[in-house]
Image (cartoon, rainbow, N blue to C red):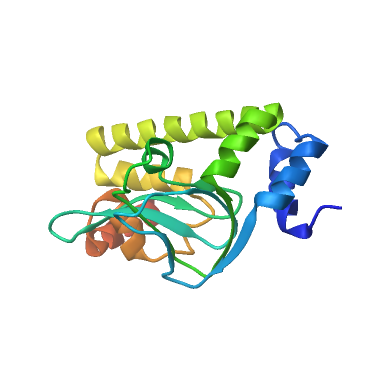
Amino acid sequence: MKSTKIQHLLNYFDNYWAVEESTIKMLDDCVNERKLKRKENILTEGENCNHLTFVVSGILKIYHIDKKGNQHNLQFASENNWLTDFSSLYNNVPSELYIEAIKPSIILQIKKEDLFNLYDNSPLFDRNMRIITENAFIEQQKRVLQHIGSTAYERYLYFLEKYPSISNRISNVQIASYIGVTPEFLSTIRKKTAIEG
């Protein structure tokens, strides 16, 4: 009998292809549940990323710190979202990123070796994760294009479109870092958005 820790994961996969019974057992054996405090890291620059992470509750962010010490938020993940450093995970190289809980969170993690074992032995898990990874890649391309060719106001509207469930759950500082402006300038943008309704 499966444990309740993977039920959120199974419910999530029901939106794609429900995984095989044998996969449920494998997931039950290899998925690790963690409770994170606010500001707790699950990845730090220089470490090798060895997990794929699914968010059950809370909010996490992926960010980079540049040579001047400025923080650049690259991605947020709230309930029913995945995150990892794909470059570090698949290429076995030290990460240039941090992954941190913005809010107290509950996550499920799959170790790299277990993930690859699931890919090899569960066609439906492999298919689900292929779609999820492809969608993540598409979103990253959109984000790069947004950052290159749009105004701060347009980047804010994109943020609201991409993260509708968290815009009121995180601080202006976090959002400003994501769209590449100061918190003060973000306040101006938010006032403009409120007026335009």
> Is residue 197 at least partly visible in the picture?
no
Q: Residue at x 23, y 59 (%)?
A: 185
Q: Identify the residue at the far bottom of this view.
A: 37
Q: Residue at x 55, y 63 (%)?
A: 58
Q: Residue at x 26, y 63 (%)?
A: 183
> Is residue 127 at least partly visible in the picture?
yes
| Image side of residue 187 versus residue 4, left or right | left
> Residue 41: x and y, percent?
41, 64
| Image side of residue 25 versus residue 90, left or right | right
Q: Quadrant of residue 177?
A: bottom left
| Image side of residue 125 versus residue 140, left or right | right
- Front residue of 27/103: it is 27
- Front residue of 190/167: it is 167
Q: Quadrant of residue 130?
A: top right
- Front residue of 39/162: it is 39
> Residue 115: x and y, percent?
58, 40
Q: Residue at x 51, y 33 (%)?
A: 133
> Residue 69: x and y, percent?
17, 61
Q: Identify the residue at the far right of this view.
A: 1
